[in-house]
Amino acid sequence: MVFFEVCGPNEAMVVSGCCHSKPLLVSGGRTFVWPWIQQIQKLSLNTMTLKIDTDNVYTRLGVPISVTGIAQVKVQGQNKDMLLQACQQFLGKTEHEVEMVAMETLEGHQRAIMGTMTVEEIYKDRKKFAKNVFEVASSDLVNMGISVVSYTLKDVRDENGYLKALGLARTAEVHRDARIGEAEAKRDSGIKEARAEEERMAARYANDVEIAKAKRDFELKKAAYDMEVQTKKADSELAYDLQAAKTKQRIKEEQMQIRVVERTQQIQVQEQEISRREKELKAQVKQPAEAERYRLETLADANMKRVVMEAEATAEAIQLKGEAEAFAIEEKAKAEAEQMAKKADAWKDYQDAAMVDMVLETLPKIAAEVAAPLAQVNKITMVSSGKGDVGASKLTGEVMDIMNRVPQLVENMTGVNISEAITATRV
């Protein structure tokens, strides 16, 4: 029957006996074992912590001291040669026995290193002491299959007060150096404070000078900028006033053009009204009078012809002809007298309208006569006080003023108010 044996990662198995010319080493694994003909043994690979005390060892200068070191050691299971050495040295022994062997070895090397160094070296340079012990002890323990994982000097002490005396002396030196350092520090501090104050004042004065220069430059630049801004502002205001004046002038010109158009339209309306009045007068007065005159003349001619024919037909033709002519003349005179009477009545009824008609027909001629001298002028120089119109609007206004005085002149000459007559005719 074959058994299957297993060991953990913190131990090693050693199989010896049949089928093995030398022991089979298994570190943290498994293997087959034939009972009765093969033997299996286990060796711990745990890390062992050792406290190494060395008391009253004389150092290089003959001062006895005691030290305590802490070491971490273990059986090396990864290296087959070292594991074989460990099996040869410790197989069958307990873990405590292995610890004792390693401790005795380390304690001997620690004691030997202490004898080669002074108290001051051990106390002040613990790292050097630990390194020396680690290197010397590792060389011996390797031959046993044990590796030193770490070594640390934990404590250094003495029973004669040497370390205390060293501490007192060092303390006195430290106090002395501290007082000297404090005095020097105060001195240096005073010197540096004075220099700092001097530099601060110099920096302050320099800063004040720079501030004054900067303020002066700022005021100069600000004055230049203000002057430029005021200049631009004045130019802008002048440009605005000029543009406003031009705009007002254009508005006035447009208003004058509108007034001219309105006057033109009023004249056209008046002309149309006059034409309508003429046609109405012709239809109501002139044409009926002419028709009546024509009727009377026709009757007179007919009567005259009739009388002449009758006179010719009779013996008294000559007399009758003379009478007929006289009658015709009389009838014609009556017709003309009647026409003149009707025309007089019509003029009486339409006296104002006729007068307005005549004035309106005459107004364009008057305007042409007033404007005729202006058409012959090559250049006109006008002086304005700034309150009235200038330019073409001024000339047009003067012509219109002359035309506006014409109705007043007509009224003064004829007694007819043209404006009232036009209003009456519209009604």
Image: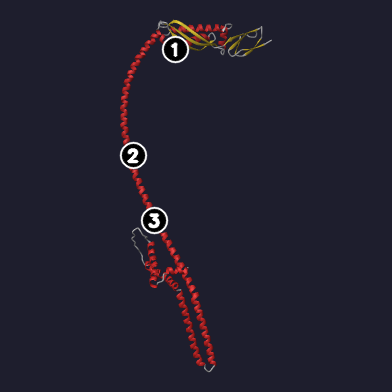
| Whether residue 415 is situated above or below residue 216 in the rendered picture | below
CB of mark 1 within 8 Å of CB of mark 3?
Answer: no
Which numbered mark, 3 or 2, is in the foreground of this view?
3
Q: Which residue is mark 2?
A: 218
Task: Name the residue: 48% across, 88% down.
Answer: 326
Q: Is residue 320 above or below residue 354?
A: below
- Indicate the quadrant where residue 42 lies: top right
- Of label 2 and label 1, which has the lower sequence position? 1
Dot in front, 1 or 3: 3
Q: Residues within 10 Å of mark 3 (few under 14, many from 20)?
A: few
Q: Is residue 382 left or right of residue 293?
A: left
Alpha-carbon distance for marks 2 and 1?
Answer: 70 Å
Q: Counting residues from the N terminus, which is met first, the one under dot 3 or under dot 2?
A: 2
Callout 2: helix, strand or loop?
helix
Q: Which mark is residue 246?
A: 3
- Mark 1–mark 3 distance (CA, rounded to whole Å): 105 Å
Image coordinates of residue 52 in percent, x first then y, are: 49, 8
